[in-house]
Amino acid sequence: MRLSSLLSRFNEPETLKMAKLGRELRAKGIDITDLSLGEPDFDTPQHIKDAAKKAIDDNFSHYTPVAGYLELRQAVCTKLLRDNGLMYTPEQIVVSTGAKQSIANTVLALVDKGDEVIIPTPYWVTYSEIVKLAGGVPVLVKTTQKNGFKITPKQLEANINERTKLFMFSSPCNPTGAVYTKNELMDLVSVFEKYDQIIIMSDEIYEYINYEGQHESIAQFESIKERVVVINGLSKGYAMTGWRLGYIAGPLEIAKACEKLQGQFTSATCSITQRAAIVALLSDMKPTQEMVKAFSERRDRVMHLIGNIPDIMCNQPPGAFYIFPNVKAYFGKISPDGNVINNADELSMYLLNSAHVSTVTGAAFGEPECIRISFANNIDNIEKGFAKLTKALAVLQ
């Protein structure tokens, strides 16, 4: 059977691959401790679940507008003004089946074959693959652990040319937890102001999971706001991963383009999810705040545990729920069964198969000297996972 050549342009997400391998081992009766997935272990707050049940009883079971219910898009506008000081109209909002679709819509609406897209590394695994799928060229700009894994204005400008179409980044960042301050964003804006052909995609899905201050959106700067597409959703901040709802806020022309694309792929996301999302966006944020407090406590514990492992360098993440330690010191070491650990890919597989702890190789995020470890799991599993991980690393020769 001849499949489309499109499939050869991009790779399966390493995060999903590790989750699948973990499930396969678990199905064989092996006790796998999952420190790989970026999924809050908390359940969706009760008031949101109640809104979904009411929506079913009220017969919200029919097709909705492709871009989402007007009331939901108005709720998104209310949230953006309330939390971010950003003014949008409902026509500038497109609701999708998860933030991943929002990102895909944006890239496919903007990127033509040969267009270059600047992506600071480390980056979320899907960014580069969506660009490739669109026929674009990812321009990966390596940031440093010393600089908190954040791109500098000098690095940004050095990679801009006449083919540059899009800049993609996240703050807080998956996988590093890096958070850009207002001043750091302002410095990047001073570069973007010189190049009006560049659209900025700002992935803010981890907005609420910020341990060190107020979230800052690059869309707050009026000089470039009409070139910014904000990506957000409900999965991380409201523990609604399986509900599948993301959204964009951006220039009207881009919003209409995303709506047109989405109309041919999925149409609107689930009607019940949309009704629940209205309540989530407009209701008390106390459950989210309590969740973030728990993540903060886990972060402190994880930093203590990683600090006890020899030869690992790890920044304390100011946001998200991952640590991204540099594990290069373990490359070249030999496992008890005689295999050499050559890179982060092999180290992650060794930890999965020998320690029965799932992590994700940093190579998937554009940083081959690191691995990603999630603390979106309860503290008992975190303690258990680190005990197994520490023991497995200690026996490498």
Image: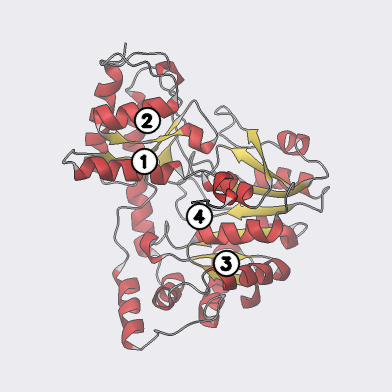
Residue reaching furthest to the front = 1
Question: What quarter of the picture does the C terminus occupy?
Answer: top left
**Amino acid on which the number 4 mark rests in the picture:** Glu
Is residue 171 in view from this perspective? no
Report the mark closest to the observer, 3 or 2.
2
Q: Is 312 placed above or below 261 here?
A: above
231 displayed left or right of 236: right
Earlier residue among tags 4 and 3: 3
14 displayed left or right of 106: left
Earlier residue among tags 1 and 3: 1
**Amino acid on which the number 2 mark rests in the picture:** Ser
Q: Position of residue 224 (x, y in %)?
A: 75, 57
Q: Is 396 placed above or below 210 here?
A: above
What is the C-alpha distance between the residues marked 2 and 1?
A: 9 Å
Q: Which mark is residue 80?
A: 3
Q: Which residue is identified by label 2? A: 348
Q: Position of residue 229 (x, y in %)?
A: 65, 60
Earlier residue among tags 2 and 1: 1
SS at mark 2?
helix
Q: Which residue is identified by label 1? A: 18
